[in-house]
Amino acid sequence: MRIEKLTNTISLLRSVEQANADHLTTVREVITDVRKNGDLALFRYTEKWDGAKLTSLKVTKEEMDEAYANFDRQLIGDLEEAAANIRVFHTEQVRKQIDFPLANNSYIQYKISPLDAVGLYVPGGTAAYPSSVLMNAIPALVAGVGRVVIVSPPSSNGKLPDSVLVAARIAGITEIYKVGGAQAIAALAYGTESIRAVDKITGPGNSFVALAKREVFGRVAIDMIAGPSEITIIADETAYADEVAADLLAQAEHDRFASSVLITTSETLAEQVSSEVERQLKLLPREEIARASIENFGYIYIAESLEQAVDAVNELAPEHLEIITKQPEELSKKIKHAGAIFIGRFSSEPVGDYFAGTNHVLPTNSTARFSSGLCVDDFVKKTSVVYYSKEMWQEQYPKIARLARLEQLEGHARSVESRSWDKGDSQ
Amino acid sequence: MRIEKLTNTISLLRSVEQANADHLTTVREVITDVRKNGDLALFRYTEKWDGAKLTSLKVTKEEMDEAYANFDRQLIGDLEEAAANIRVFHTEQVRKQIDFPLANNSYIQYKISPLDAVGLYVPGGTAAYPSSVLMNAIPALVAGVGRVVIVSPPSSNGKLPDSVLVAARIAGITEIYKVGGAQAIAALAYGTESIRAVDKITGPGNSFVALAKREVFGRVAIDMIAGPSEITIIADETAYADEVAADLLAQAEHDRFASSVLITTSETLAEQVSSEVERQLKLLPREEIARASIENFGYIYIAESLEQAVDAVNELAPEHLEIITKQPEELSKKIKHAGAIFIGRFSSEPVGDYFAGTNHVLPTNSTARFSSGLCVDDFVKKTSVVYYSKEMWQEQYPKIARLARLEQLEGHARSVESRSWDKGDSQ
């Protein structure tokens, strides 16, 4: 890995994948087709792109039971424990309605209510991660969303991976459809004969899926469109090079655009990590992907001080930050911008990716400056309620009318003044 | 106003304003220019489009003091009282960090921290609403945002309206720049010599501003891009036609795309409101705008029952809902989707627009199904923190490694396993 001196303006070479203009044309055609032809279009695209000739889109109870019966018992236990951890921590995020009394028996309220229906996209093939099923589904269910649906492209044998069905069952989802790509997003946004429309679509996907989500945004809500995954590690001379290298490679194996950055105050560690990365790379099953990622987006920076390292991190606002230093907790208090922070050498990123209970859907590409990981808030909406009694209105309306006239909105002033004619006092 | 029978699938003719393609080209040129030429570009555009030849962008303390000294004392009192109400209610929304202990002295945390810097766009001319300054600025300040900045286009005399400067001062903002349009949005997103970049941009604006916000989205966060304003009123035979008509017109006077809908169980009220609207329209200063709005987007629906009215509202998900019936509070509990709900005849919409303390920046165009009005949450972000002790890691890592291998992410498994070599137990 290349080693550079940390300068005050750290700027990473980031090649964000460009949306393909040809894909956009295809995506728009697919959406129009699904809106017009419904299920028929879904069957047609699933045959064309996934090679699966289906007669029904919905996963049956028998398929769910079979997947569960076939699945490794120990792994089911692991997934159940992970799900329980995620559920418990996200339940802590649930908020209560605010009831705020005013004078004269009046009040305002802030109602917090779950969305009616949410769709979760699960990619196919090796990118079908059961952990992502848990991370997307559980916050929605904890929020109280009435209907949580999964869509995922089938293999050519017309099946979904057992791991996805098992994770869905553990999360508590039974409505699952075998459809992927832009056609699945169109179905979720507009509805077809088999698939009722939802209010929000979350979950990762390829560029067709990302483009389709952008297209239907406004009709429905969407989660973030995530960029490539990133880690930054702050380490001092107390860190072990093999551990730091393993953590950098865990990020790099995701895809060739993933970014792994080490910022260290120790030149010795920098050099050791650099050779460790090379040694471990050769032993990694996904060596080719990880090597491309490290070569293009891997950096080791030597910092003059931990303070300089912290400043650089606050500038980068990385998705994941590990702190492996003598006093990692102290240092973490100075971090202003990061999606998730992992403290000390025993809290490496996979602890949060899979198990601790925090969410692994996190803001990428420096957006941690102003946005947050997936959470219960993403599946609720807030409605304000205002009740003014007659007495309250009598006290306050002249002020309201004056403020309206200040803005030259005479109709607003007349709306509150219209009550002043004495017609009785119902409500 | 036209009167129709409410059918089960109420679908309003909504003409959402189309973004102008010519404007987009201009907006992109402006953004490039500001990124390249900084303040010089801002001065040039301000002279060209606002007719103001400036030598400095920042509003001075003297200008602030003068505006305040010139301003009507009673109106200052009204604005201060409105600001206090907004501040108190938004303070109720502030959330605390979650500290969540785990076994083995481990923990997870959910840190809630304010954004560093936010920019608020305030339109010029008659659309410069002091109430919007309060509604956008106060939630940001209550959230703890360190730097809240206003940008607004000056008149040709190089000044901003007194009402905007006074509202800003009452809200607690002193950093205000005389620049508007796409150039102001570019300056907020990328920074210039005079204006440091911010992390989020909120506030309404014309189509240049809306397009520029879309363009810089991702670089910075933005609030919603609002559609035309809407009201739906549910009323029964106990409502007064003149009051309902006044409320419909208060909405209609906003702009010609605004939408005003009455759903009533009383045919008599429907007819009375229809003639009252016509009578009041002739007396309204903004008659022309309100008339266009009522003609194109005004409807009176006759419902068979209040239940049917509630179903229609839940389908519409209006920005504002007034309920003027015998038991409005009971009925309000059945409303699932609305930006804000106003209960009873003494709580007409301007009460919330100006004064009660709730926010008047609300989701339009049926997006209340899945989104919320502006609030303190819009100005904070959440960071998860994970700390696993050595003991916790020893207990849990085999499960984490198994889950990683289930997803064929061997590097993730090795990251947690790399700790297993006994090298001491720092942290």
Image (cartoon, coloured by chain):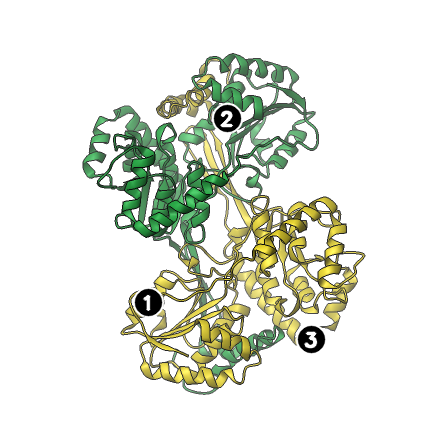
Chain colours: A yellow, B green
Assess whether mark 2 and mark 1 are in contact (beta carbons under 8 angstroms).
no
Describe the element under mark 3 as helix, strand or loop: loop
Residue type beneath disc 2:
Arg
Residue position for label 3: A72
Question: Residue B326 at what x, y percent from top left?
Answer: 59, 23
Which label belongs to residue A310? 1
At x 59% / y 69%, what residue is drawn? A81
Q: Quadrant of the C terminus of chain B?
A: bottom left
Q: Which mark is residue B110?
A: none
Task: Provide residue B26's location: percent of width, then percent of height.
Answer: 42, 42
Q: Are marks 3 and 1 in contact (CB under 8 Å)?
A: no
Which of A66 and A396 lies nearest the eye of the viewer? Answer: A66
The quarter of the picture where residue A340 lies is bottom left
Q: Secondary structure at mark 2?
A: loop
Q: Which residue is label 2 attached to? A: B256
At horizontal 35% and vertical 43% (from top left) the residue drawn is: B184
- Label 1 and label 2 in one chain: no
| Residue B24 horizontal side relative to residue B72, left or right | right
Q: Chain of mark 1?
A: A
The foreground one among A274 and A326 is: A274
B186 shown above or below B235:
below
- Dot 3 or dot 1, earlier in sequence: 3
Question: Mark 2 near mark 3, Cβ–Cβ under 8 Å?
Answer: no
* Left or right, B167 with reference to A22: left
